[in-house]
Image (tube, rainbow, N blue to C red):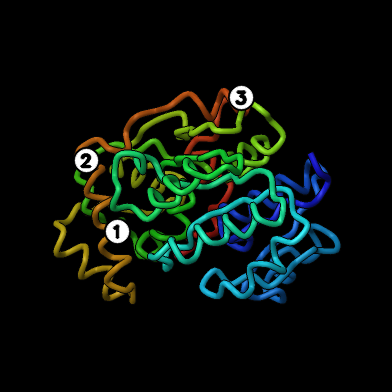
């Protein structure tokens, strides 16, 4: 294996930053590909030392070649606003492989192999047909959604979702970052596709009760129908395409799509993955009312 760095996309987001921190902790050389080099430097200032950061805008293929040049690994994720992956993520994979890149670790979503409408499925299909080595991480719902996607609702005392009383095996992105980095150095990870979940499946009623207890104020779960949920997201300023995807994913929770606890993440880490409660305890300040 060559000694070039691993290129990390989405480095200032939840999962990308977890990958960056895991690489740094292991002393593995890396480069972050970001739309704003200055923002990346602010994000990690005082934490990682001198940051190797380069311009990479996934919607601008003319930024790809310089970003991938000299890299041996690529951690790839799809930013939520990016719907068309064929001229973007798939082209980046091609450019990475063409300049000698060896291994792509792609953050997909649980069930992508069975749902061709999910953009991640098109990237998976491209990787499966590609000669470059790859590892696919099919992640479940992130515990970090509580501090990101659901944060403002929680700060106002509620969780509003069309998920009924289904269960979710939330996964902590800190564990995903550690797992992704481990895949780069493991020959057995090449060609693998892993479903990664947390160690337990909980309902949003239980999440609301947990937040109520730890925040010492009332947080209620309010299950709503599809139309009301879509209107709720629209008022929050989300575009219709993203509303459609989030609605489909969250209504799938009603059918049990997110309740399966998979042992793979724990096996990869050599320990029990983090729980939702551990994540909440570590980030209580996020939900100050």
Q: How far across and how far down the image is residue 195, in percent?
A: 45, 33
Q: How far across and how far down the image is residue 244, in percent?
A: 25, 62
Q: Which corner quadrant holds the N terminus? A: top right
Q: Secondary structure at mark 1?
A: helix
- Neighbour tally class for label 1: few under 14, some 14-19, many 20 plus, Cα within 10 Å: some
Is 44 displayed left or right of 128 in the figure? Answer: right
Q: Secondary structure at mark 3?
A: loop
Residue located 38% across and 59% down the image: 150
Q: Decide: is 287 above or below 1.
A: below
Q: Are marks 1 and 2 in contact (CB under 8 Å)?
A: no
Residue 271, disc: 3
Which badge, 1 or 2, comes first in the chain's sequence? 2
Task: Please tell me whether mark 3 or mark 2 is closer to you in this view.
Answer: 3
Q: Which corner quadrant holds the C terminus? A: bottom left
Which badge, 3 or 2, comes first in the chain's sequence? 2
Residue located 74% across and 46% down the image: 23
Q: Which residue is mark 1?
A: 245
Q: Secondary structure at mark 2?
A: loop
Q: Which residue is mark 2?
A: 165
């Amino acid at each position: 294996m060559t000694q070039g760095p691993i290129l990390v996309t989405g480095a200032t987001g939840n999962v990308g930053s977890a990958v960056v921190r895991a690489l740094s902790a292991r002393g593995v050389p890396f480069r972050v590909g970001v739309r704003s080099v200055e923002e990346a430097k602010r994000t990690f200032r005082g934490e990682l030392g001198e940051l190797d950061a380069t311009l990479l805008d996934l919607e601008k293929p003319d930024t790809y070649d310089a970003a991938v040049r000299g890299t041996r690994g690529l951690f790839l994720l799809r930013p939520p606003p990016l719907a068309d992956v064929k001229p973007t993520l798939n082209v980046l994979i091609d450019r990475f492989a063409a300049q000698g890149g060896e291994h792509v670790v792609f953050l997909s979503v649980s069930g992508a192999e069975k749902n061709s409408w999910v953009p991640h499925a098109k990237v998976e299909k491209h990787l499966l047909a590609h000669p470059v080595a790859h590892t696919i991480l099919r992640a479940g719902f992130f515990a970090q959604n509580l501090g990101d996607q659901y944060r403002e609702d929680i700060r106002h005392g509620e969780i509003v979702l069309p998920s009924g009383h289904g269960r979710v095996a939330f996964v902590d992105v800190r564990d995903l970052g550690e797992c992704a980095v481990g895949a780069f150095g493991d020959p057995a990870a090449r060609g693998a596709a892993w479903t990664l979940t947390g160690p337990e499946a909980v309902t949003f009623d239980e999440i609301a009760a947990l937040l109520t207890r730890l925040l010492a104020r009332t947080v209620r779960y309010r299950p709503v129908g599809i139309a009301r949920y879509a209107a709720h997201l629209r008022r929050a300023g989300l575009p219709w395409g993203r509303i459609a995807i989030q609605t489909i994913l969250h209504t799938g929770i009603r059918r049990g799509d997110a309740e399966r606890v998979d042992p793979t993440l724990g096996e990869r880490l050599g320990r029990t993955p983090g729980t939702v409660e551990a994540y909440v305890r570590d980030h209580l300040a996020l939900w100050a009312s």
